[in-house]
Image: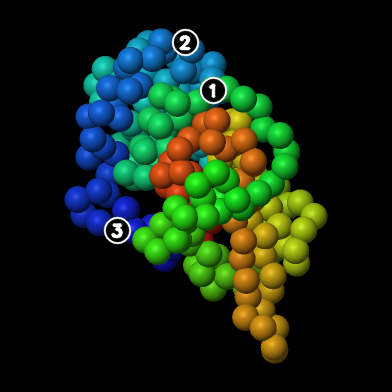
Amino acid sequence: MSRTRTDANDLFRWADQLPMPLWDDVKARPAEQAAEAIGARFADGAFEVPMLGRTYRVDPGMRRILWADRPDHRVSYQTGVVLLTALAKSLGVPPSGRMVTPQELQGGLLFFTGAHSLALEPLAKRFGYDPQAMVAAAVAMGGEAIPGADCAVRLPGLPCLPLYVLLWQADEEFNARAVIGIDDRALFHLDLAGIFALTNVMVARLTR
């Protein structure tokens, strides 16, 4: 099980527990502008937002987030944080195609430590001896294998924000090692907390 601390906390587990100010930020922005910036569709008072190969329906009026194809399925808190933050903040800047680690983003070196450390160990533990399973999981989420490390994948975090995982396999001398990457324009779409949540959702989905 991946280390997604917020989702593990019963007080902050589901999207219906999101704080009101996050919803207020989305409602304060013109809906068409928000949809265009994030690469979403707005119709009938709700957004349809692709994220990691799955489409979510975000309804600011009802303050509700659902899977578009499975409205009975509960959505995680961290998924909701990503979706609402992107809808409220994204500037619609296209990806550069240049990968950096989240720690390399402005302010990331201090932020991604301690309680906000990236969930790298679950990736190394799950795929360290079976890298092709990581490729298969990524492809199932709309991702693809790319050159890099012993095994590497690129995933559609958000339409304008790709994510990456690089994996070095375990051998007789070294333990497996994983690195999470993100497009270097990530802060045009999410703040650091949103990026942390997005990486946690990705790891949880990959290692499930």
Image coordinates for residue 167, horizontal then vertical, percent: 67, 65
Between marks 1 and 3, how big is the CA–CA gap? 31 Å
Between marks 3 and 2, how big is the CA–CA gap? 34 Å
* Local crowd size for mark 3, using a 10 Å CA cut-off: few (<14), some (14–19), many (≥20): some
Give the residue drawn at x 37%, y 38%. 81
Q: Is residue 162 above or below residue 5?
A: above
Between marks 1 and 2, how big is the CA–CA gap? 13 Å
Residue to which mark 1 is pinned: 91
Residue to which mark 2 is pinned: 32
Residue sticking out furthest to the left:
11
Give the residue drawn at x 67%, y 60%. 166
Q: Quadrant of residue 87?
A: top left
Q: Is residue 72 above or below residue 89?
A: below
Instruction: For the residues labelled 1 and 2, say whether their Cβ atoms are less than 8 Å apart.
Output: no
Of the residues tagged 1 and 3, which is closer to the observer?
Answer: 1
Q: Does residue 194 appear left or right of residue 170 in this picture?
A: left
